Structures are given as C-alpha cells and as structure tokens.
Amino acid sequence: MVDRQASIGERIVGLLPDGPRIALKRGIRGLSEKRKLARADLVVVGHPKSGNTWLRFQLARVYQHKYGLPESVIPDVEILHGLNRSIPQLHMGAYTYIRPIIAGPAPAAQLAGKGVVFIVRHPLDIMVSLYLHIQKHALHERKLFNNWPVDLSKTSMAEFTDNPDWGLRPLIGFFNDCLRQHERLVPSMIVIYEDMKAQPAQLLARITALAGGPVSPEEAEEAAAYTSFDKLRQAEIENKFNTTRLRAANPGDPDSFKVRRAKVFGYLDYFSGEVLKRLQAMIDRDLDPRLGYGNSATKDTPGM
C-alpha cells in the first residue's frame, strides 16, 4: 500500500511544470539529506566528478566483503549500517546541499563530531569531466535539478569553465572552503584524487579508520582491486550493479561513460595555449597552494 501511494505521488509530481516540480523535488531531497547527515558517522564531501562515485564503490565493497553481505548492496553505502551495526553509518554528501554548509562558518556545526572526508582533484580535470558528463551522460531531469545547462552543443569547454555558476571560479572557492573546514574539524582528512589513483588501498584503510570501522590492509587491498578502473569500466559496460550510478548513456561513446578515463592531468588533452595559461594562472592566484595544484604548490596541508 505504501509503495503504491509513493508511486502515485511520483506520477503526480511528474505532471507538474518544470519549475514547481524541480522545486518540490529539491525540497524533498533536502529533508532527506538533512536526516542522513544528522545520523552519519562519516560524511564524504566532494564536488561532482572529483572521485565521489569511485570512493562510494570502494567503501561499499570493503564493508560488504568484510561482513559477508550480498553483492547487490553495492554501491548503496547508506544502507550498510542498517544491515550490520558494526559498519559505520556512511553518508555521501550531495554537493547541492553540502555546499552551503561548507561555505558557512568553520567548523560547521552540522559536521562537528563526525569523521569528514574532503575529496579534491585537479580543478581542470574536474571541469573536463563535468562538461562531458553534462553533455553526454546526465539525464535532462538531473540537469534541471542541479541547475546545469540543458544544452552544451553551442558551448565550448573553455566557455563552460568560465561560467560563474558552475565553472572554475566557484570550484576553487569550494576547495578553499573545504580546506578551511578541514583545519577546524576533528576528525577530518583531505583526500587527493591523484593520491587515490596512486595508493587506493592505503587511503581506503585510513578512511575506514576515520569512520570508526577500520579494515585490515588485506581487506582494503581486496576492495581496491575489486573497484579498479578496469573493473568498474567493465561493470559499467555490463550494467553489473543495475544502478544509474554506473551505467553508460551510450555504450558506443566512451565519453558518455560514468567511468570515463580517470586520467590524471587529462585536461592537457583539452586545454592548451592561451586558454590553458589563463586557467592555470587563476588556479595559481586563487586556489590555496597547500592543495598542490598551483605552479608553486606545496602539499603540507595540516592533517592530510
């Protein structure tokens, strides 16, 4: 009866015009995010295309395997604690709702006393990945929900990166806010995407320890191998997990995959010349050098 009522409700919402429908969906999602955040032992904070989905699969696998849960729970990390109380309550913070919290006073009251992981990645790699994701992967409803451009066919990647709402400048501001919150929140850690690529098992072990549910090095190694780029790319091709979180929009177009390239410094294949110089100058000038992405960067971030 409850499922039937929910289904009827979803159909009614679907009949609404774009504006009221999206506003209603955002409101409902906001209440859900607030409840999840309040219950969480570990909160993952990241900008879209910074490695959130990859870490979601790593966490889901390491605890699913450790506690003998069915593989079908992957990648739903939020449900794991309800299946086994030894697993910390995990929450992958949705960017739309976590962003205002991160931009506010530090330390953020909503994150106090929780383990918090801030994921950062080279800003220009994020810009490339987000542009292609919106252009070739994201559904129309998702674009409206996130206030992304519906049509990028006449927008170059450079123009997209310059946009004041979803481009490089707000991304730099978000990363600086993450670092500011990290310095005031205990326990928390900054996770560098490029380090995740180089040493996934070691970082996964540190993250689970921060969550209060540590795993062994061997368990972390197994999860890292299970969620390698090649394994997740194949899983996406096969739709192994039957989830929109890992499903190619067009199997014939590699750029439409959720697991697209995961290439470090892949932005050099898309930006060059004066455009690249201008964008890198913005990073050098405005992004905290301790995150390691400027020409004069030093990775001496406290607690990293």
Image (spheres, helix red, strand yellow):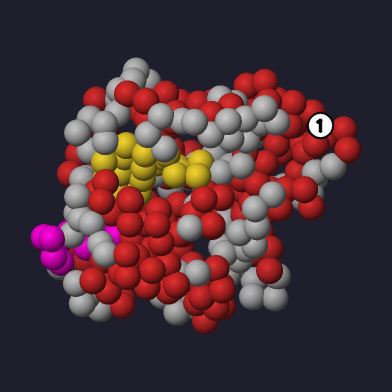
At which x and y percent is residue 253? Answer: 70, 70
25 with respect to 1 (left or right): right
Q: Relative to 62, is 114 above or below?
A: above
Q: Which residues are magenta?
A: 76-86
Task: Work out whether residue 242 can be spotted.
Answer: no
Q: Residue at x 22, y 38 (%)?
A: 114
In front of the other: 114 or 83: 114
Q: Residue at x 40, y 57 (%)?
A: 202
Q: Quadrant of the N terminus?
A: bottom left
At which x and y percent is residue 211? Answer: 24, 49
Task: Name which quarter of the figure residue 40 lies in.
Answer: top left
Task: Work out whether residue 207 can be spotted.
Answer: yes
In front of the other: 23 or 221: 221
**Three-letter residue code for mark 1:** Lys
Q: Main secondary structure of the magenta part?
A: helix
At which x and y percent is residue 154? Answer: 80, 45
213 with respect to 222 (left or right): left
Q: Which residue is mark 1?
A: 277
